[in-house]
Image (cartoon, rainbow, N blue to C red):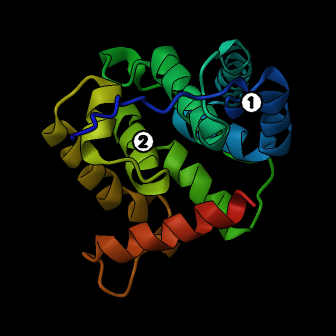
């Protein structure tokens, strides 16, 4: 005799989801990292602050995010809010950027963050999302509402422009954008801790 089993899909239990308290803890614990992400995307401290606080509000209103995804989801909320606020595909999206610090900080990471903030809006968004946050080209294109080719071109422009904005980024081989990207990823990861 053949016995047929009914398939019962896995069902998440309420304690598998992030709560408001969990998101509050993430935003408190990752405040510097999330603000840095907001600043790099908006290139403006006032806009970064608005983006950060809008992210908190959005996260607290999230209903169904797994706990394991909550930290990633918090960063994604900041990115989505920055896209809404800045509209990087708009012709008016290139605004005067702020420096990361108000002082002439000699730290390489401060100079790097200030250089990233000087990129054109689309190039900056693509660079931050694809290089620093490691989103795929397709994911960047979907979030930004543009083609994967636009994302690839913006990433290429950003990697070509950054050494001119901050000469210390120039590798021994000036056309080696891969090593520039790796160095920036390391600096970004280091600044987030």
User: Which residue bears the numbered disc 1?
Assistant: 15
Q: Position of residue 35 (x, y in %)?
A: 71, 38
Residue drawn 47% across the image and 15% down it: 84
Quadrant of the image occupied by residue 75:
top right
Number of marks drawn: 2
SS at mark 1? helix
Q: Within 10 angstroms of label 2, few (less than 14), some, or many (20 or more) residues?
A: many
Q: Position of residue 51 (x, y in %)?
A: 65, 22
Q: Within 10 angstroms of label 1, few (less than 14), some, or many (20 or more) residues?
A: few
Q: Position of residue 52 (x, y in %)?
A: 70, 26
Label 2 – label 1 distance at C-alpha: 38 Å
Q: Is residue 127 left or right of residue 16?
A: left
- Tell me if residue 116 comes above or below residue 150 in the rendering: below
Quadrant of the image occupied by residue 182:
bottom left
User: Which residue bears the numbered disc 2?
Assistant: 124
Residue occupying the far front of the picture: 1
- Tell me if residue 152 comes above or below residue 189 in the rendering: above
- Tell me if residue 170 comes above or below residue 64 in the rendering: below
Residue in front for this viewpoint, 130 or 74: 74
SS at mark 2? helix
């Amino acid at each position: 005799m053949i016995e047929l089993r009914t398939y019962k899909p896995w069902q998440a239990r309420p304690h598998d989801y992030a709560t408001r308290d969990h998101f509050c803890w993430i935003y408190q614990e990752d405040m510097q990292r999330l603000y840095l992400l907001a600043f790099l995307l908006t290139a403006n401290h006032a806009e970064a602050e608005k983006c950060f606080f809008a992210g908190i509000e959005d996260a607290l209103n999230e209903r169904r995010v797994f706990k394991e995804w909550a930290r990633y989801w918090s960063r994604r909320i900041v990115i989505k809010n920055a896209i809404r606020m800045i509209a990087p595909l708009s012709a008016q999206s290139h605004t005067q950027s702020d420096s990361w610090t108000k002082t002439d900080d000699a730290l390489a990471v401060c100079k790097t963050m200030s250089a990233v903030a000087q990129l054109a809006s689309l190039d900056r968004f693509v660079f931050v999302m694809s290089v620093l946050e490691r989103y795929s080209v397709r994911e960047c294109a979907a979030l930004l509402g543009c083609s994967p080719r636009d994302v690839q071109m913006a990433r290429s422009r950003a990697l070509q422009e950054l050494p001119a904005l901050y000469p210390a980024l120039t590798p021994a081989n000036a056309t080696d954008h891969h090593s520039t990207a790796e160095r920036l990823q390391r600096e970004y990861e280091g600044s987030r801790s």
